[in-house]
C-alpha cells in the first residue's frame, strides 16, 4: 500500500512514477585498453612514433565537423568554457531562452577536462615507442538539445581516443514532450510537474519508457555528434552502452500550495526521523549488520541536512 497516498488521498490530485535523470556511457571496447589500441593503429598503418600526430588530426576533424553542425543548425560557433566547474546545462538553458529555440540543437560547448586516453612512450627494452594508457586532459564537446521526442538533453563526446560518449536524458522532460504530442496540457516548473490534465495517460507514457530500444536510440545521435566515426574507426567497431546513472522518482501533486503547506512541517519531520543510517548505508552500497549498525568494513561518515529553497525544501543524507 502507498501509505502517503492513502493518508492524503483527499488532497492529492495526481501521482506519477518513473525515470528522472538517466545517464548512459558509450565505450568502444576494442580500443578501450592499450593492447587493443596498439593493434588498431597497427592495422591502420600508423607507426607508434606518429601516434600523437594521428590522434591530433582525428580530434581536429571531430571538432571541425561539430563546428559545421552547430553553425548549420544554430548559426553559432562552438563556445569554449574555461572551467569544468561551470554548469554547462545552465548556459544551454540561457542560450535556448535568448535564441527562442523550441526544438532541435541548442548549441555546442567545448571544455578541456580529465580523461583516460593513450600516449606513445619510448620503451628502452623494445627500443621504440609503445602505446600506453594514461590519465590526461583533452577537449570534450557538449551538444545540448531540446529533442522533439526526448526534451532537454545532452551528449558529451571525448575528442581523443577512445572517444567515450555520455548521453544524459531526463524522464520528466521526455514526458513533457510526449504530453505535448498528445495535446494534454500540463504545468512544468523546472523538473517538477505542478499539474497534468490526465494523470493516467502520463503514467502510461512513463511506463512505456521502460520498453525503449536503448541501443537504437543512443546510437542514433552518433551520426550528428561523431560523423567521422566510420572514417576513423571503420564499420566493424561500435559502441557498447552502459547505464551509468539512473534516478527513479515518484511525484505526488497536491491540489494547491495552501493545502500542502498545512502538512509540510509534519512531512519534513517524518522524512528526517525515518531517514535512518541503515537505509542510507544500504542505498550508498555499504554493508550493514542485521541490527542496522554499520559493518566494520563500511567505515562511513553520514550527514543529514535540510535545505530550504525558494520553492520548497529538500532532505538529503550524504555519505561523506
Image (tube, rainbow, N blue to C red):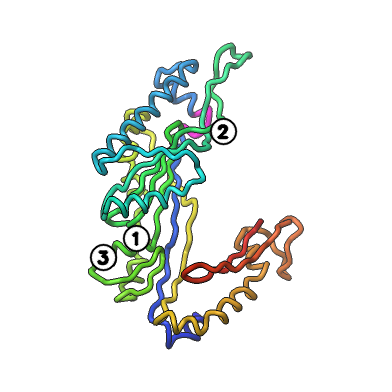
**Bounds of the magenta span?**
31-36
Give coordinates of residue 146: x percent, y percent. Answer: 31, 53
* The one of 29 and 66 positioned closer to us in this rendering: 66
Q: Main secondary structure of the magenta part?
A: helix
Q: Which mark is residue 180?
A: 3
Q: Position of residue 298 (x, y in %)?
A: 71, 57
Q: Are marks 1 and 3 in contact (CB under 8 Å)?
A: no
Q: Give me the C-alpha separation between circle 1 and circle 2.
A: 35 Å
- Identity of the residue drawn at 32% across and 64% down: 176
> In this figure, which residue is indicated by the disc labeled 1?
174
Q: Earlier in the sequence, mark 1 or mark 3?
A: 1
At a point 63% along the width and 13% down the height, the residue shown is 124
Give the left or right position of residue 292, taking residue 32 as reference.
Answer: right
Q: Secondary structure at mark 2?
A: strand
* Place of residue 247 in the rendered image (x, y in percent of width and height, measured from the top left): 48, 61
For marks 3 and 2, give the CA distance.
Answer: 44 Å
Number of residues whose C-alpha sits closer than 10 Å to that of mark 1, classed few (under 14), some (14–19) or many (20 or more) = many
Provide the residue designation for mark 2. Answer: 135
Label ID, residue 250 = none
What's the residue at 30%, 76% (across, down)?
A: 198
Q: Secondary structure at mark 1?
A: helix
Specify the quadrant that holds the C terminus: bottom right
Q: Residue at x 40, y 81 (%)?
A: 256
Residue 4 lies, with reference to residue 233, above or below; the image says below
The reply to whether dot 3 and dot 2 touch (C-beta < 8 Å) is no
> Any magenta on residue 35?
yes
Residue 130 falls in image quadrant = top right
Label 3 secondary element:
helix
Mark toward the start of the polypeptide (1 vs 2) = 2
- Residue 252 image position (x, y, % from top left): 44, 76
**Earlier sequence position, callout 3 versus callout 2:** 2
Amino acid at each position: 500500500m502507498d501509505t502517503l497516498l492513502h493518508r492524503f488521498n483527499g488532497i492529492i490530485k495526481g501521482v506519477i512514477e518513473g525515470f528522472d535523470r538517466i545517464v548512459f556511457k558509450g565505450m568502444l571496447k576494442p580500443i578501450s585498453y592499450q593492447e587493443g589500441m596498439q593493434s588498431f593503429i597497427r592495422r591502420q598503418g600508423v607507426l607508434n612514433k606518429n601516434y600523437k600526430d594521428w590522434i591530433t588530426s582525428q580530434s581536429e576533424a571531430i571538432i571541425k565537423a561539430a563546428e559545421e553542425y552547430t553553425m548549420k543548425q544554430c548559426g553559432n560557433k562552438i563556445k569554449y568554457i574555461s572551467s569544468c566547474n561551470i554548469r554547462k546545462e545552465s548556459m544551454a538553458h540561457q542560450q535556448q531562452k535568448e535564441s527562442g529555440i523550441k526544438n532541435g540543437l541548442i548549441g555546442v560547448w567545448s571544455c578541456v577536462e580529465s580523461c583516460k586516453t593513450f600516449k606513445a612512450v619510448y620503451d628502452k627494452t623494445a627500443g621504440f615507442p609503445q602505446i600506453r594508457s594514461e590519465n590526461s586532459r583533452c577537449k570534450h564537446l557538449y551538444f545540448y538539445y531540446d529533442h522533439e521526442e526526448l526534451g532537454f538533453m545532452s551528449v558529451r563526446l571525448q575528442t581523443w581516443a577512445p572517444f567515450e560518449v555520455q548521453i544524459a536524458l531526463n524522464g520528466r522532460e521526455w514526458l513533457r514532450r510526449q504530453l505535448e504530442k498528445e495535446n494534454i496540457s500540463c504545468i512544468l516548473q523546472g523538473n517538477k510537474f505542478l499539474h497534468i490534465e490526465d494523470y493516467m495517460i502520463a503514467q502510461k507514457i512513463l511506463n512505456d519508457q521502460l520498453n525503449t530500444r536503448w541501443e537504437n536510440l543512443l546510437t542514433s545521435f552518433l551520426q550528428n555528434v561523431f560523423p567521422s566515426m566510420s572514417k576513423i574507426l571503420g564499420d566493424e567497431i561500435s559502441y557498447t552502452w552502459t547505464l551509468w546513472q539512473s534516478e527513479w522518482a515518484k511525484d505526488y501533486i497536491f491540489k494547491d500550495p495552501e493545502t500542502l503547506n498545512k502538512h509540510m512541517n509534519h512531512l519534513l519531520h517524518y522524512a528526517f526521523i525515518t531517514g535512518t543510517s541503515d537505509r542510507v548505508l544500504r542505498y550508498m552500497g555499504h554493508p550493514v549488520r542485521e541490527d542496522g549498525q554499520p559493518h566494520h568494513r563500511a567505515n562511513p561518515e553520514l550527514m543529514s541536512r535540510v535545505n530550504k529553497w525558494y520553492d520548497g525544501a529538500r532532505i538529503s543524507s550524504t555519505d561523506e
